[in-house]
Amino acid sequence: VVTAKKHKVVDEYMPLMKKRGYSVHEINLSRPENSSDGFDPLAYTHSDSDVRDLAKTIVQISPDKHGTQDPYWDDAATSLITAEILCPNEMWETCPECERRSQFPPSMEDVLILHSQLRFSDSEKTGFTNSSLDYLFEALERKSPRSYAVSCWKSVSKLASRTVSCIYSTVSTAYNRLFTTQIREVMQKKQLDIRSLGDKSSALFITTSPVNKYAQAFTNLVYSAIFKE
């Protein structure tokens, strides 16, 4: 597995690896159209703990950190992201009549769209009492009363107005910085079968940006999934 900040390296060594019989793949975060494979970090989460770890990573590697920061905000943002990831996934698992069930599970793109639809409404300036996604979590709670997604959602959904606004802003900033247009295109390509890399001689080139630190952060998610799988 090779990380290259200049495509010159890929152009030079990809033909050589193919000539030597390697199965060669490329994830190109700078020019998605050149990617032979895609990568969606959500595809490699297998438990609530995995999802929580992914959510925490998204929060920690995306926003700029200025000295010490109250961990409450990161923890709350992590809970919101965890709820947004798990909700469509758990709804998919508990919805046998769902048309998409037979095709594919929810992706990170689904989560980003879900977040873009999230709206809160304030009642008499006492705090947020309603959100545009309440119906989803209420339906999920009826289907799965012990849902971890519901638990995470409740930990942030009924807080004071200003508090929820800050949490929502933190999550939005994290998503916007990490999941750029180019990376979202990569995520929607045919997924790289990471496990197959260990079955035969394989080479994976990850082309990233020398100046975009968030593309480099996304590369770390790829490596994390490779190590785990």
Image: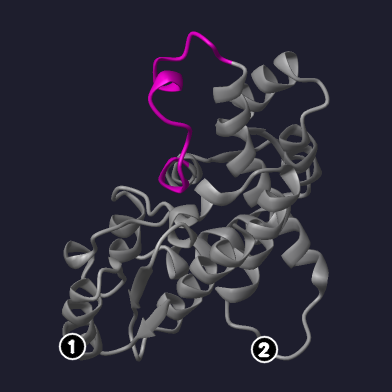
- Relative depth, front residue between 25 and 123: 25
Question: Farthest front residue?
Answer: 20
Q: Which mark is residue 12?
A: 1
Image point (46%, 68%), residue name:
178
Q: Amino acid at mark 2?
A: His
The reply to whether residue 133 is in sight is no
Is residue 60 placed above or below 140 in the rendered structure?
below
As helix, strand or loop, the secondary structure at mark 1 comes to helix
Residue 142 placed where, x, y %?
73, 14
Q: State yes or no: residue 105 in magenta.
A: yes
Q: At 36% from the left edge and 65% from the top edge, which residue is drawn?
A: 180
Residue span colored magenta: 95-110
Side of 210 where 65 appears, left or right: right
Q: Earlier in the sequence, mark 1 or mark 2?
A: 1
- From the top left corner, tell me how far across and down residue 225 is, in percent: 56, 61
- CA gap, disc 1 and disc 2: 40 Å
Furthest residue in direction top, as rendered: 97
Q: Quadrant of residue 181?
A: bottom left
